[in-house]
Amino acid sequence: MKKIHIILLVLIAGAIAVLISFLQTTTTYDTVQTAMEKPGKFVHLMARWDKAQPMEYDALKNPNYLSFTAVDTLGKSVKVVYHNPKPENFEISERLVLKGKYTAEGYFDCSSIQTKCPSKYKDDMKAAQKNAQHNAATGSANTETK
Amino acid sequence: MDYYGEHLLPGQLGQFFIILSLVASLVATFAYFKATQSEFDADKGYWKKLARYAFITEAVSVFAIFSILFYIIYNHLFEYKYAWQHSSLSLEFKYMLSCFWEGQEGSFLLWSIWHCILGLVLIKTAKTWEAPVMTVVSFAQFCLATMIAGIYIFNWKMGSNPFILLRDSGVLDGAPALHMNFDVNQPLKQDYMLSIKDGNDLNPLLQNYWMVIHPPVLFLGFAATIVPFAFAIAGLWTKKFGEWTKPALPWSLFATAILGVGIMMGAAWAYESLTFGGYWAWDPVENASLVPWLILVSGVHTLLIYKHSGHSLRSTYLFLILSFIFVLYSTFLTRSGILGETSVHAFTDLGMNFQLTAFLLIFTLPAFVLFIKRYKAIPAIRKEENTSSREFWMFIGALVFFLSALLIIGKTSLPAFIKVAPPEDMEFSYNQIQVFVAIIVAVLTGFSQYLKYKETSRGFFREKMLWPAIISVVAASLVVGFGHINYQKHGPMFLGAIWLATACSIYAVIANAAYIWLGLKGKLNLSGGSIAHVGFGLVLLGILLSSSKKEILSHNTSGIAIDFGPGSDQKPGENLTLVKGVPMKMGKFDVTYLKDSAHPKKQQWYYKVHFKSRTDSEEFTLWPNAFVNYKGNEGLMANPDSRHYFDHDVFTYISALPNPEKNKDTATFRNKPMKEGDSLFYSRGYVILEKLVSKDNIPFEGFKPGDKATVATLKIHSFNNTSYTAEPLLIEKQDARFSQPDTVMSESIILQVNNAEAGIANIGIKESGTVLEYVTLKAYKFPFINILWAGIIITAIGIFISMIRRIQLNRSSKE
């Protein structure tokens, strides 16, 4: 066996080991219930903002504190705390992917919020249609006055 | 039915050229195929001539399609969906080309254009290799032509046509105002074009100068990978297994340089206009373009090994084939939308997944069948490489690069095929592996230059290597010892790896730079490889230093936010809120949000943020900007701004703005015509117009000669005996007029000039309860980012020097 073959085998074995260890670091998509069952474990919580519950955010007081209630498709809800400014399209998002951990204190400590729309493309088209209709409705008075 | 105000001719012409390019590329493929296969010279000549005519026809058609689409965008023909969706009346000329690459169709077109140009160069230069190589290129052109064909074959739609009319695209179907009797089931009104006033505009994030040049360069890089691939296939096909490597080498170098620069221009764009706070995020889109580059670099190195020692021809075939296959795979990954959940980029699924898969397979399968069938016949040297030879270590370097590429694409693709979520820290998951790749590769590039092909004597190696090694050890100890590289986030092991990698990349820079003198006696035209390696060492060094020493400046240590609320064990936040006019402490700076101003034509606001150092005389102003609720895209799209220094950048962007709904101003402007000296009352005082001045030159973005600006100087006297000055501004451009109001915060009033003529100004005043204005922003310090950018430029220069040298060598060997 040539030296180069030995090195090749070692490198490939290393690469496979890396891929396997990568698979072990991957996380899961969870509901509120399953996230609560594994406190302290990093999960992707799929939920949406429960608009009926109060949301706490005041950029003047503290731009790094957002707290709201998230509810999943099964109807179970959890309090979420996020230490960053409120994502800009938070209000209009239909779905949120919340990355973080459920804590022993009984809230979901979120490190990142991904706001989701059913399809970016469809959404763009919707916005575009709205524009077209708006333009149609208001006639010409659009580009001149600003 | 005929509609008024439509221009149908360009679309029909475009349609014609699309069909022509489809047919011509198919004819070219077939004719080049016959020219390769036929055994008689006369036949060969006949087919080759036909093929050339066909390919030139194809090239002309593609240029015509491109020009017609540009004509449509340039003339704002919004009856075409492409112009309507990707451009607008207010779009600056320089961004009109960017419209091409915002849409799928346009970017396929761009790719196709580069293939045409490369194909024409190949026709001129490839000589005996022309027929087989151009068979591959022509066939790729045919595949790309199907992507923009938009033809229905039975019920299956092939490709997406850039010339589709807005009224045929379905966009208007839901708009009652455009239909007869306001009923969407009825046909469109004949004069519906009267209502289509403006287009949807280019995505604001793409309105950046990097986006004008990054996609063309990147696509030239993608397109160029087909040439080494086609040469490799030609070698397998014609069974002339080794000869093609000579002409393929300069082409591979060209593709490496262009693709590399293209990728990093994208990184520069991300750095300047995205807000994740960096230039690289291991996003699937980035990874998918990096992987072909890594494999191509492996291929370039094995090409050199083959040329000098006769080893590694089989791996050369594998690498060059795979680098193009991975370009196709990246096209599939990024355009099919299957990565939608894991990427921050907006993927659009055009319903072309079948076609994209077919595009990938139709090249992958035949290429691998051919490779496997001919594998045994490819000449290989039985004798083992000597461990003191350059080729041995070069091959290991190529192998490490190749495996690192496979790991990256594996990690990127996994979530698309099995249902797992990404790890907690995606970037770290890549970095912890790639830092070791950096260490190995940096060391290999450093010492393998000092080895000779075939065999090196120990004495020679030791003598030449000694000084660069000593200097590197000293330099690396200084940098690691005093450089304050103290990245604690992932523990001492990772920090150790960063230190080691930093030391190794310093060694790569010094050893390669020294080799230019020690090994090549300063002959720059011979030292392309060493220069490229110096650049690559600098790239690694720049990446390591800028990432591990990145600092967040905007730690929330201000007086306003004391209470971090529940969970206050958290680190202080990374965002700072600045109230207009109130200085806040940020690192060594006092930072003040001074004012904002609007773009003359767009819903884009510039925020003037002033940084003043408390410890020295450093002082500067940044203008981060944001699109707010732009063209139906609700929310904020922020563009950062940065202050560049020799050794670091200060980088800031708007991370949040007051909620426009909550702060909605219900008060309206009260208007009054005033001349100088006139006064105007408001609830808590009065305002005097002191001065009204017209200017034809003001320092304002977009202000052109011929535009006029009027400045009103207003003195505000409050009843509590304080007075203020306000200077609202009116800008009159040829086609638009816009007013930049001024605010007196403590009196909660806003003043603006509505119009001004012959010394009389119509002044508007608004009293509002909610004028408290603030922005929330995030600021970073990036040290040594310039090492990275300089490294990229040096690498590219080095590769181009090598390329020119290889072309010269090929020429002289033929004579």
Image (spheres, coloured by chain):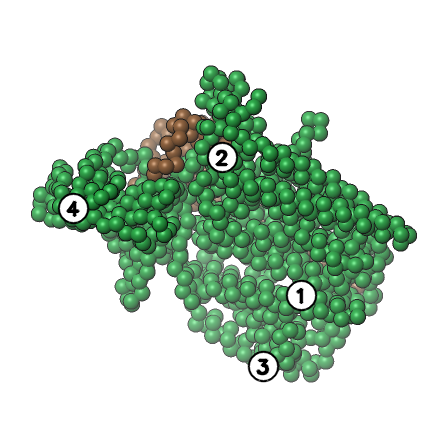
Chain colours: A brown, B green
Q: CA distance from mark 2 to mark 4?
A: 49 Å
The reply to whether discs 2 and 4 touch (Cβ–Cβ < 8 Å) is no
Camera-nearest label, 1 or 3 = 1
Which secondary structure lies at badge 2? helix
Q: CA distance from mark 1 to mark 2?
A: 44 Å
Name the front one of labels 1 and 4: 4
Q: Is residue B751 above or below residue B244?
A: above
- Classify B788 as above or below B733: below
* Residue pictured at 80% horizontal, 47% vertical: B50
Which dot marks residue B803?
1
Q: Amino acid at mark 4?
A: Glu
Which residue is at 51% across, 63% downward? Answer: B788
Q: Chain of mark 2?
A: A
The three-letter amino acid code for the residue at tag 3 is: Trp
Please identify, in this view, whether the residue under mark 3 or under mark 4 is nearer the observer. 4
Tell me which label, 1 or 3, sits earlier in the chain. 3
